[in-house]
Image: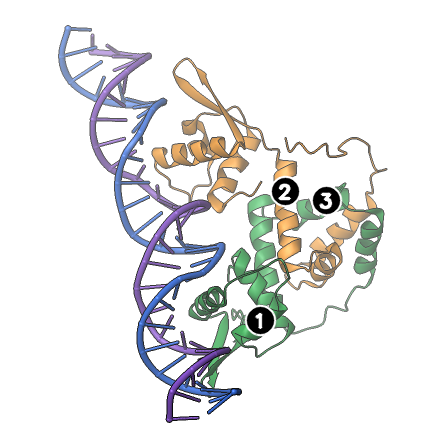
Chain colours: A orange, B green, C purple, D blue
Amino acid sequence: MRLTDTEWQLMNCLWEKHPATARGIAGRLPPEVKWAYTTIRTLLARLVEKGAVREYKEGNTSLYEPILTRENARRSALMTLVNQAFDGAYGPLMHFLVNDPNLTPKQRQALEEALKEQPENRGGTENGGDNR
Amino acid sequence: MRLTDTEWQLMNCLWEKHPATARGIAGRLPPEVKWAYTTIRTLLARLVEKGAVREYKEGNTSLYEPILTRENARRSALMTLVNQAFDGAYGPLMHFLVNDPNLTPKQRQALEEALKEQPENRGGTENGGDNR
DNA sequence: TATATTTTACGACAAATGTAGTAAGTGTCA
DNA sequence: TGACACTTACTACATTTGTCGTAAAATATA
């Protein structure tokens, strides 16, 4: 599931708190984003159409809820990046990250920390093909 | 500099070998990509227009050469990803990578390897604002 | 040189994306 | 009960992206 720029913004709000109304989302968008209420509705409708979001009515009001998980959205965004920019392999990406001058020493360290915090390969998530 | 899906394909060919003709690029595209010659020309023209590629004539033939470096294209693609999908921070990305079940133990190890190979923070590239 | 092959220069067009607007329905409060 | 305010349902429209096609010019070749 590919998300566009605007869709990421909406999904980020939805993941943060849901179900949510269009108005509620408007309130949680970053301040520099000034979309008309109807714009948000349109984008939400597209997300529903794509199957990334579910819409249901509470009386007359539409409530929205993510179907696509943040986890899965991230995974596919990352795979896309790796495929198009890093020869389809994690290795080059890693290499790039560690060498990235934009990465502060602190971040680099965090990276190492994160690596240490190795999970014992917790089960589940054997990917049954369903991207919820 | 944002590249679209198709632009990545062309740029990948160009970085691999340049200068190159449209015909030459056609030859180096992955086999599943079957674009008409004119499609390639159109995409190259758009890249030139964007300033990612330089075009010059050798007699009557157009030769293309990347202006945007792979390094910079990667950097901005990564930043875009981090910004829209990982709260703008490397940390969450790292965390995600290490925990990604799609990452095989071998890849995970590669990641660690990459991390070890720490560069002595070689100078330069202090980002003068120029994205060549 | 007449013909076949390539390149170039432009134009086209559908689908996806970004961004609204309008009209009609519903709820709300003086 | 009328005047507002908010929702919904549609429609709209400019750009960007993905994919070519055609005609004319340049090159190569028989």
Callouts 2 and 3 close, C-beta under 8 Å: no
Q: Taking B36 as reference, is A33 left or right?
A: left
**Residue B123 percent location from the top left of the image:** 68, 73
**Residue B4 percent location from the top left of the image:** 51, 57
Callouts 1 and 3 close, C-beta under 8 Å: no
Q: Which mark is residue B3?
A: none
Q: Is residue A19 above or below residue B9?
A: above
Residue appearing at x 50%, y 69% in the figure: B52
Q: State how far apart marks 1 and 3 are (Cα).
A: 37 Å
Name the kind of residue labelled 3 in the image: His
Q: Residues within 10 Å of mark 3 (few under 14, many from 20)?
A: some
Residue identifier under label 3:
B95
Q: Nearer the viewer, residue A67 or B36?
A: B36
Q: Which mark is residue A74?
A: 2
Name the kind of residue labelled 1 in the image: Ile
Q: Secondary structure at mark 2?
A: helix
